[in-house]
Image (tube, grey):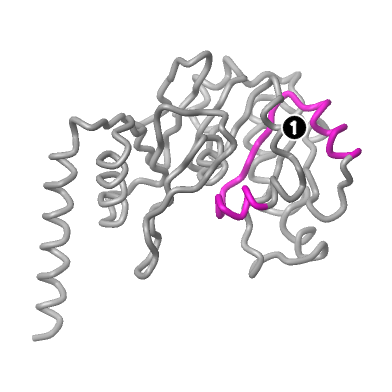
Amino acid sequence: MINILLNLTNFHEAFAFRKLRHFIKKRHNVLIIPLAYHEDFVDNGEEFAAHFVKGQPEIDCVVDAFAKFKIPSKQIKVLNYYSDTPETIANKFKRADILFFPGGYPDKAMYRIDKYNLRELIKSFDGIVMGASAGAMIQFDHFHVTPEEEGQTFGYCDGLGLLSGFDIEVHYRERIEQVDGVLTDLTKRGLPICIMHDNSGLIVKNGKRLIIGDAFWVDKDDVDVFQFISEDRHQMEAAKREKAKN
């Protein structure tokens, strides 16, 4: 299995194409597995079809990216959470060379993967597993969830168990929540973390890790650096709040 971890579906752009063209071939068949949506957004078959079938932007952005690698649309299938049966799902997996997991909510994706009994199909898949954002996070044995807004808390969730021994931080923009999340993860687990900006990613093959774009690694030796950045950011935010009062 080859794992490709991304932020966005921009893997057809120059920063990624030069490396990924060695892995993604025009003969490949692709199965897109869109399961990371929130139920407030999609909660029935009609709503699913309005977003997650060919012809809709959420799927076409992936299809268009694979077109750069000369993979035609006819070689790309989409798993339909509401209409596919265990038999049709097994058939789609059997024909696929690449599984692609779009972004969204990683915990929602894992819930649906287990509800649909897809875990063993995925773990036994002998091809390329790609994912953007949440679709990258769920590939680990355990992944951390960084708060997106005030009131949310940092936490860990169980993933698919395809990868272990390191972690990723997606969509990194040095927000306070992200800095604190990386600091917490480094302190609690001490695993190396691949920090991924939007134009970046990571390829994992046979235990070897190849950075794509402007991703970079941090480890437990960087705790002091992130502690410094965190304290600086919190001081700045406190100053802003104080200024707003006056």
Nearer to the camera, 110 or 72:
110
Query: Chief secondary structure of the magenta span?
Result: helix
Above or below: residue 61 compared with residue 99? below
Left or right of 25, for residue 45 = right
Residue drawn at point x = 84 percent, y = 39 percent: 89
Magenta region, residue range: 87-111
Residue 134 painted magenta = no
Residue drawn at point x = 11 percent, y = 47 percent: 228
Residue indicated by mark 1:
121
How far from the left and from the top, in percent, is residue 137? 50, 41
Q: Farthest residue to the bottom: give it.
A: 246
How far from the left and from the top, in percent, is residue 209? 43, 19
Left or right of 155, for residue 19 = right
How far from the left and from the top, in percent, is residue 132? 54, 41
Residue drawn at point x = 37 percent, y = 70 percent: 151
The answer to which quarter of the image holds residue 78 is top right
Nearer to the camera, 22 or 145:
145
How far from the left and from the top, in percent, is residue 127? 68, 21
Q: Secondary structure at mark 1?
A: helix
Q: For the residue marked with disc 1, what is the amino acid? A: Leu
The answer to which quarter of the image holds residue 211 is top left
Residue 88 painted magenta = yes
Q: Residues within 10 Å of mark 1 (few under 14, many from 20)?
A: some
